[in-house]
Amino acid sequence: MKKSIVLLGIIIALTSLSCKKGETENAQPTNKIIKKAPVRKAPKAVFYTLENTKDWLKINKNAEDLEIALAINRTDKQFFTKMDSVIIPTDLSGDIAFYLPFPVEVPYLADVDKILFFSYPTQTFAAYENGILIYTGPTNMGKKKAPTPTGLFFCNWKAEETISTVDDEWKLLWNFNIANKGGIGFHQYDLPGYPASHSCLRLQEKDAKYLYEWADQWVLVDDENVKFKGTPVIVFGSYPFGTPKPWLQLVKDPKSLDISESDIEKVTTPYLEIVLKEQEKRKKS
């Protein structure tokens, strides 16, 4: 009798272990892959002064300093040198992300693999992966008579070089279309330091190249139907045309243009469901 009880106990124990092993093997991992933020160097403090452009260029020859100065003034080297005065940080030792308004992390976007934002009022863009700021820089968007439309878009097709639909003499480099019928996209072109385009989103060449490689295109079933869309793009806010450039406010208040995590959540919430839906389509393909 005792031997039977012992034997029965062993059988039950082995069965229990076998079930647990099976449960472990069939269990799906629950831990998400956490995206790590790029290693960045923060400046000691960020304050701004208005400097004579020629005088500043005589003293500052460092390429990294110039890159930051161009971004803060929303321009490129060609137009920067033509400006009478420019806004310059008192400390140029930090990563460019610390001088531009987008937050370096947005937990609300943790489930979004990739998303690109363009801020009309600050004339800047930001690329995020799972809520981590991956890349940011200046842009010059649509002028008052030809404003860039706001809302949710998706990256469609891209071309290293294409010709503008507005003027066949305008060559657009590293062009990524986001509104196929409207002919709107982000690409390299002159950045005079204010909204000047015919609805498109102009970028410095290095930034246009980066986004050209980083963002995903749509995938088509045929010439008329989209299998799944590319990287989502949200354009938001409005530019105060007819007033001084918004970044001039930085001299009095270095945080005047800051975009908060809650700001990003607010502009993303109306579109989050469709963004995640399109993302899931791409993953299942």
Image (cartoon, rainbow, N blue to C red):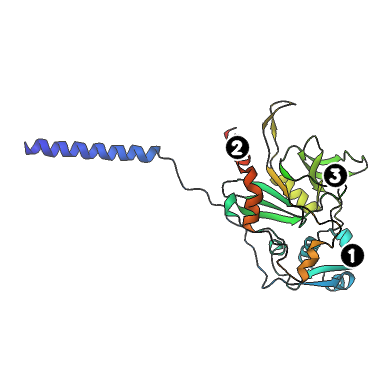
**Three-letter residue code for mark 1:** Met
Which of these two is toward me, 125 or 215? 125
Q: Which residue is denoted by mark 2 in the rendering?
A: 277
Name above or below for residue 257 compared with residue 26. Answer: below
18 to the left or right of 63 = left
User: Where, by quadrant of the figure, is residue 259 drawn?
Assistant: bottom right
| Residue 127 on image: x %, y % | 68, 51
Q: Is residue 71 above or below residue 169?
A: below
For the residues labelled 1 and 3, the Cα–Cα distance comes to 24 Å
Q: Is residue 66 visible?
A: no
The structure residue drawn at horizontal position 84% and vertical position 74%, both measured from the top left corner, is 59
Which residue reaches farthest left?
1
Please give left or right for residue 46 compared with residue 191 in the image: left
What residue is disc 3 on? 172
Sequence-wise, which precedes: disc 2 or disc 1? 1
Disc number placed over residue 83 in the picture, else none: 1
Q: Quadrant of residue 261?
A: bottom right
Nearer-N-terminus badge (2/3): 3
Q: Secondary structure at mark 2?
A: helix
* Residue 213 visible, this orientation: yes
Q: Are marks 2 and 3 in contact (CB under 8 Å)?
A: no
Q: Nearer the viewer, mark 2 or mark 3?
A: 2
From the image, which quarter does the C terminus lie in?
top right
How far apart marks 2 and 1 lie (CA) works out to 46 Å
Q: Position of residue 53 (x, y in %)?
A: 87, 69
Residue type, label 2:
Lys
Identify which amino acid the numbered label 3 is placed on.
Leu
Residue closer to the observer: 12 or 133: 133
Q: Secondary structure at mark 1?
A: loop
Across and down, in percent, residue 66 comes to: 80, 65
Marks 2 & 1, CB-CB < 8 Å contact: no
Residue contact at pointers 1 and 3, CB within 8 angstroms: no
